[in-house]
Image (cartoon, grey):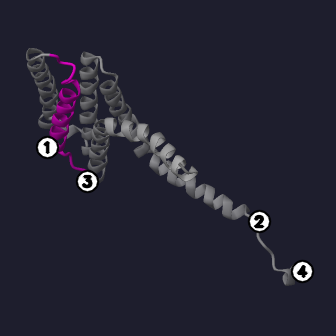
Amino acid sequence: MSETELTKNAGDVSDRPVLSFLQRKLAYIAVLALAIGGVAYTNISRQPLVGYWEFLTLVTGVLCVVTQWENAGDRQARVRLMWTQGLHWGAILVTMNIVLLSPAREMLPAPAISLVLLTLLALGTILAGVSFLSLQICFLGLAMALAVPAIAWFKQAALFLVLAAILIIGLGLAFWPRRTDRRTAGVP
């Protein structure tokens, strides 16, 4: 084997664990991206996406069942898994609809409603992870929960960050050493 073939094969072997890891975690990453995307869209459009959050709750419930299907050994355990998760995510859906359909919706602006719904989804995901003793599902819920204050902070800090950037650019332009023309350097 030549050196180029060895290097090529070594690169393939080192890339496989990373690719395999990303493929195994793709469903969790997709759910997290959909949750953050829903909040971002709601912040831009200023309208709550009722159906979107219900769909995302169902997707998260299906993800929980699918990831735990192998751990449920027999038919009875799988039926119990589907029933318990159905009741669990049904309770989360009912809670979301209470927030969306009650007079509380009128007191909250649309971006705040999306953050409340993301918090409820995060809580449901963490509780599902705890009931399964699954670190991956718990971390997904924790990531969703941590996204709530991060999104709120970023929204409040966005103006400050823009003003800070303008200030730094302005100071840089004011104090940047200027190149002088040699012909005018000797003229008073």
**Please, what is the three-letter code of the amino acid marked with disc 4?**
Pro
- Residue 183: horizontal and vertical position, in percent? 86, 84
Q: CA distance from mark 2 to mark 4?
A: 20 Å
Describe the element under mark 2 as helix, strand or loop: loop
Of tags 3 and 1, the one toward the viewer is 1
Tell me the element at label 1: helix
Mark toward the start of the polypeptide (3 vs 4): 3
Q: Residue 143: horizontal and vertical position, in percent?
A: 36, 32
Whichever of callouts 3 and 1 sits on the residue coming sooner in the sequence is 3
Counting other residues with Cα less than 10 Å from the Cα at mark 4, is it few (<14), some (14-19), or many (20 or more)? Answer: few
Q: Name the front one of labels 2 and 4.
A: 2
Q: Which residue is mark 1?
A: 51
Say which amino acid is labelled 1. Answer: Gly
At label 2, the amino acid type is Pro
Residue at which label 2 appears? 177
Q: CA distance from mark 2 to mark 1?
A: 57 Å
Q: Name the disc covering residue 45, or none.
A: 3
Viewer-nearest residue: 186 or 26: 26
Q: Which mark is residue 188?
A: 4
Q: CA distance from mark 1 to mark 4?
A: 73 Å
List the single residue furthest toward the bottom.
Answer: 183
Are the residues tagged 2 and 1 within 8 Å (C-beta)? no
Q: Secondary structure at mark 4?
A: loop
41 displayed left or right of 146 = left
Q: Quadrant of the C terminus?
A: bottom right
